[in-house]
Amino acid sequence: MNKTPRINRLFLATIIWALASSFLIGFFPFVYRMSRLQLMALSQLLYFLPVLVFLVVHKINPAKWMPFKRLPLSVIGMIVLYALLLLPMTTLLNLISMLFVKNALAGAQAELSAGPVWLNLLVIGLLPAVCEEFTFRGLYYNGYRQRGVWCAILGSAFAFGLMHLNFNQFCYAFALGVAFGLLLEATGSIFATMTAHFVVNGWNVVLMAITASSGSAAGEQAEAAAEITIPILLSVISVYMVLAAVCTCLAAAVLYWIAKRCGRIPHMKWCFRRRMRRRKEPRTMFTPAFVAAFVIALVYMIAAG
């Protein structure tokens, strides 16, 4: 089965559906009574709908498309450490993108921090970790894997970044997508990327809760973010460049330990030296559907600023 064209058509359908649904739900009065957290949960479920349709229409058994392998507790602990070591890199990319575009989540943090921590962990942490990893490191990754390991890593990460539909989140989502792809190869289990994704999102939830607990810090934080100047931003970036460089190198060492503990060092060496490609199959993952999805997402991101 040539999976890549199917996955690209799913990507195009999901982009169109994401934009159309954000417009259509405005016609339902109950939406205006929903909190920011409820809207995030609704959008996550709406984005996942095309995936469910794809599974049903093509009669796909997820267990045959993605590796649901149990992991030992020692590996899970190191996955948590790996995800935490990625945080300075994601913060650095977020700060750099803020030199050119607005922080996409700055306006929502004050409202989100007002909710219960457990509910924020569920909606912001767990739900995206499961749905997005199932989609991008599951279906998309498997579809692109026929064209080679790096095609799977970069292709699924690129689609993951574009699906956020803003330049700010695209920058660090793409980088995380690459890191999660490497983790998937190192462990052979999608549970690993779901865990890492949850840790990254959960860390942000915890930070919001700590900020909110310091009195009226939520409002002050929003005002401070709006008043930040380019010189201040550049000075913070210079600090995070050093921190991100050190932590990313440590993350690479942790990834090596994880691959060794999972017995996948020979696999990692093999899959990065050879291509898993069918005979006479095109080397590129790009199809008209993928290009169309990219153009639509790019035009929207530019128009939205």
Image (spheres, rainbow, N blue to C red):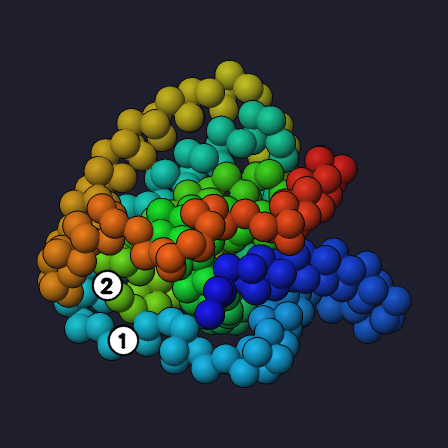
Q: Secondary structure at mark 2?
A: helix
Mark 1, residues whose alpha carbon is within 10 Å: few (<14), some, or many (≥20)?
Answer: few
Instruction: Give the residue drawn at x 30%, y 65%.
Output: 192
- Label 1 belongs to which residue? 69
Is residue 159 something that shows in the picture?
Answer: yes
Toward which corner of the image does residue 59 lie, by quadrant?
A: bottom right
Q: Position of residue 103 (x, y in %)?
A: 59, 39
Q: Which residue is at the far front?
A: 280
- Residue tagged by mark 2? 187
Q: Picture coordinates of residue 232 (x, y %)? A: 49, 21
In the image, residue 144 above or below residue 252: below
Which element type, helix, strand or loop, lies under badge 1? Answer: loop
The residue type indicated by label 2 comes to Thr
Say which amino acid is labelled 1.
Answer: Lys
Image quarter of residue 74 = bottom left
Q: Can you say which quadrant of the picture contains the C terminus?
A: top right
Distance, label 1 to label 2, CA atoms, is 9 Å
Give the percent coordinates (x, y) of residue 181: 35, 54
